[in-house]
Amino acid sequence: MASIIPGYEYDIFISYRQKDNKYDNWVTEFVDHLKREIEATFKEDISIYFDENPHDGLLEIHNVDKSLETKLKSVIFIPIISQTYVDPKSFAWQNEFVAFNKMAKEDQYGRDIKLASGNVCSRIIPVKIHDLDATDTELLENEMGCRFRSIEFIYSSAGVNRPLKPDDNPDKNLNKTYYRDQINKVANAVKDVIYGIHPDPRKRTAKSYQTTSISGYKEPVKESIPEKETKGKRRSVRTIMWGSLVILLVAALLIFVPKLLNKPRSETVAAEIIKKAIAVLPVSNLTGNPGLQYIADAIQSDISGRLNGISSLIVRPDQSTLQFRGSEEPVQQIAKKLSVNNLIQSTMKGTEDNLQVEVRLIEAFPEEKNIWSSIFIYKWNSISEIYHDIINKIVEAAQVKLTVQESKNMALVQNHNTDLLKACRLGDYYMKLMTKEGFEKGLKYYNEAMAIDPLDPLPYLGLARGYGESSHGAGIGVDAPNRARDYALKALELDSTLSDAYAILGHWNIYHGWNFDQAEKYLTHAIKLNPNDAFAHCHLGWLYCASLIPDTRYSRTYKMDDAFAEMKKAVEISPTETIYQGYLAWLYNSAGRFEEAINESRKTLQLDPNYTMAYFVMGSSYAEMGMYYEAIEAHKKGIAISPDYLDGLGVAYARAGQKDKALEVVKELEKCMDSWWCASGVAEIYSALGEKDKAIDALEVEYKLGGDFAPYIPASWIFKPLFNEPRFKELVSRFNFPK
């Protein structure tokens, strides 16, 4: 059967490599489904050339079957692009793909067809069944002379790269692709091309469409139309003209009215998105005195802290920018890494009593541009006075809009005793070193500050931060969280507007006070005061994860959608901090969305290839997917860096049926049962092994030690085998969950 377009042998030529059809006849099955889909799409009969036994891999063949030349004279060419197809040595690539591309460019219609919609579509419609190597994509694009676009039939999941099949569940496919939809896309693409050549192929004849060449462009020359048809056609033309006029008027309104209002819609939207993100880079200490570094850190902290109070800005946390201290990277490269368009660069020169601070606001894109800069000269005891001027200049230059309340807040000048302020800055500097020695030195400075003025909230807030952070890194002791809580409460007694204090109290109530109602109040208030508090967003996300707890009280209190929204907000605010990206991966794992957890873990490892948590989440997700080899390997990689997540390996062994190896891990963890972390790990492994009583015994230890994760025991799928055990139910009943 010839093509419905005169002059062509077939409507569709399907090209593939034989080895891609040998394993499971995927190509044959695809062609069969495509034929049926085309029958349901076209009124006409469409002809398809498909050779079920093609020559393939014949590197030395020169006598190509002459009939192939006529068969390639098809309207549309569909190559099945696989991992093996893009091979210059293969028969399919050289004698079909390259040959058709050349032929189509030279025939009467050309390779690229202008559609009725005004879009342009190639007569080569690639069907991709594997993700390709970059070199293969480059070869395709070089041959086609344009960016490679295809209709994808790829089933993607962790470690999987294969063709999509009709029976594949889209929920298990990372691409969420339906095979049936992709077949429909191919059929509609074929229809667009054929009807782009002629809107009604049935009425087309070789006589009525001859061609004339004008400067290389081939335009159809039509026969005269009978007079009887002209009236109706004039009416249609008139209708089309009026319709076009209406469309043009609407387009004009959309384009020109915003310009008259000085607010081009596209530019305004772009500006809102781009200018919301800003980063305050570490201040360069050019004084020649390392002892003044604490002042440089204080300047950065104060500027970013004040900008944090502006709801229309996303301000990158100082932790995200520390990596660029002393960096010689180009401005645009730094901006890309931080996902911002505006950077604040500062330098500090002089002495403590004669400081010269230069502040610059830089726009990174589309080209690097200095928007504003100024030099401020002041003494240490007048540091608070200059921030008002700096922030106002930044807000004005960056065209940031403030609410009425934000304007009032910016006008406030906080006056602190100079010696107290200096002691607090030194205390903060040393505590952030995250060493025991640094903590002790920082504590000494904060005590000096409290002695200077017991009614100033600044030292109490600094100690709340210091104890809160040190409990995770400096080995200060188990009482650190409670001290962080007490100092935060004291700071709020003196100043009720301190967002950090509310965030610290929210954190304490989740992981130590086990009071979710109170935690939610504190965290939401912290975010109200500081919308850019990534810490508060992150832990509010973990709080909302309580919706997983199998208790009717939770289903109407929280939703996992809210948990993901808050965690993603933390990542958005601080995209370079591994902890938030890692927590997002862990949250997906907690929700049983293991493939997404693996994807987010990979993103975490792009930020830090030695981040142990990412390997733990990845390994745990693989284990629950039944991919035990991948799970064990991922855990081993993480443990080689740090043994912190040894329990994950034990669970993977248990899931894989390797009980002896799982018990070896348990024996190692039981050496440190005075730590709630080890007790939690022992409980998880015993639960995975089906040792219910031993698992609950370990959970009792975790509960008595006040483990951070204890409130989430009833939300963890790993303890699901224990849910109906009376001892487990009694343990859960002790928590102060929301009512």
Image: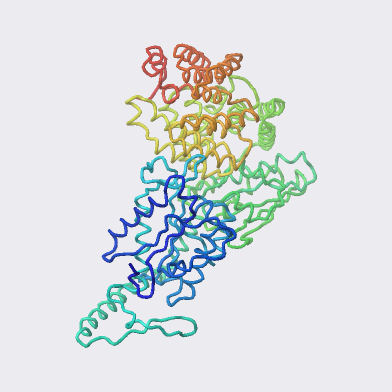
Query: Closer to the camera, 447 or 144?
Result: 144
Q: In this view, does 185 lie above or below 537?
A: below
Q: Is residue 80 above or below residue 633?
A: below
Left or right: residue 351 versus residue 578 is right
User: Which quadrant of the structure image shows residue 478?
Assistant: top right
| Whether residue 498 is visible | no
Q: Which residue is drawn at 43% across and 51% down?
A: 153
Residue 106: horizontal and vertical position, in percent?
49, 75
Residue 650: horizontal and vertical position, in percent?
55, 22
Left or right: residue 79 versus residue 432 is left
Q: Is residue 130 above or below residue 8?
A: above
| Whether residue 155 is visible | yes
Q: Quadrant of the C terminus?
A: top left
Query: Closer to the camera, 666 or 389?
Result: 666
Q: In which quarter of the image is the N terminus?
A: bottom left
Q: Which residue is drawn at 19% across and 86% down?
A: 228
Q: Which residue is drawn at 26% across and 86% down?
A: 225
Residue 401: horizontal and vertical position, in percent?
48, 55
Residue 211: horizontal and vertical position, in percent?
40, 83
